[in-house]
Image: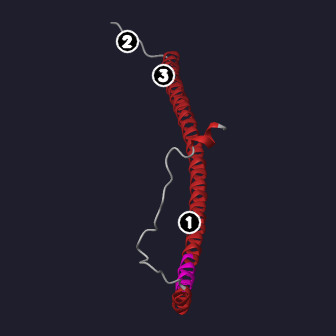
Amino acid sequence: MKTSPRPSADDAEAAQDLKQRDWCVNEQFKADNNRDDLAYEISQLEAKILRGQEKKAKLEADELATQKAKEDLEAEMQQALDDRTAENGAYTTAKDDDLKAIDLLGQAIETLSAYGSNNALLQRSTQPEFEVSKDQAPDAEFSDKDSNKIGRAHV
């Protein structure tokens, strides 16, 4: 009769060592995988942070450019308003001057008309009397066309 060998303490310890080794290898594998996964995530996050910083820098530059453009536009608008105000002032002054000139011309016309009507009687009385009609042309006697030939020959 054969008896089955009994497991010895060495066999049980060896099995426990193998089990412990397998567990250790498995845990080491999990730790390595976890470390690699975390390293990959870190590199992805660092890249994402870098892209975010670049985008932030670009947006800040765009903001500065927009602020500058806004300030330039506001300055141009202020200049346009100042120009318009000055032109309107010049227009108003010119219009007032024109109205004053129209008034003065009206006064001058009135004064000259009054002067003319007052002096019209004097002018009528001092006009010479014509013996013939004032519309009749004067008599004209012309010399012969050859009368100046002698004078021209010596010239």
State the CA–CA distance, disc 3 to disc 1: 94 Å
Tell me where residue 62 appears, x and y as whole percent: 56, 45
Q: Amino acid at mark 1?
A: Arg
- Give the crowd class for mark 1: few <14, some 14-19, many >=20 residues within 10 Å: few
x, y (%) of residue 5? 41, 12
The residue that mark 3 highlights is: 19
The first of marks 1 and 2 along the sequence is: 2
- Which residue was labeled with disc 1? 84
Is there a contact, CB below 8 Å, between mark 3 and mark 1?
no
Q: Which mark is nearer the camera, 1 or 2?
A: 1
Residue 63 against residue 25 in the figure, above or below: below
Most prominent secondary structure in the magenta stretch?
Answer: helix
Q: Is residue 108 magenta?
A: yes
Q: Earlier in the sequence, mark 3 or mark 1?
A: 3
Say what amino acid the circle numbered 3 marks: Lys
Observer-nearest of 45 and 75: 75
Q: Alpha-carbon distance for marks 2 and 3? A: 24 Å
Left or right of 107, for residue 2? left
The answer to which of 37 and 135 lies nearer the viewer is 135
Label for residue 100?
Answer: none
Q: Give me the residue at 58% from left, 36% from top.
A: 50
Instruction: Give the residue at the far right of this rendering.
Output: 154
Which residue lies under the disc numbered 2?
A: 4
For the residue labelled by badge 3, is the local secondary structure a helix, a strand or a loop?
Answer: helix
What's drawn in magenta, residue-wise?
A: 98-109
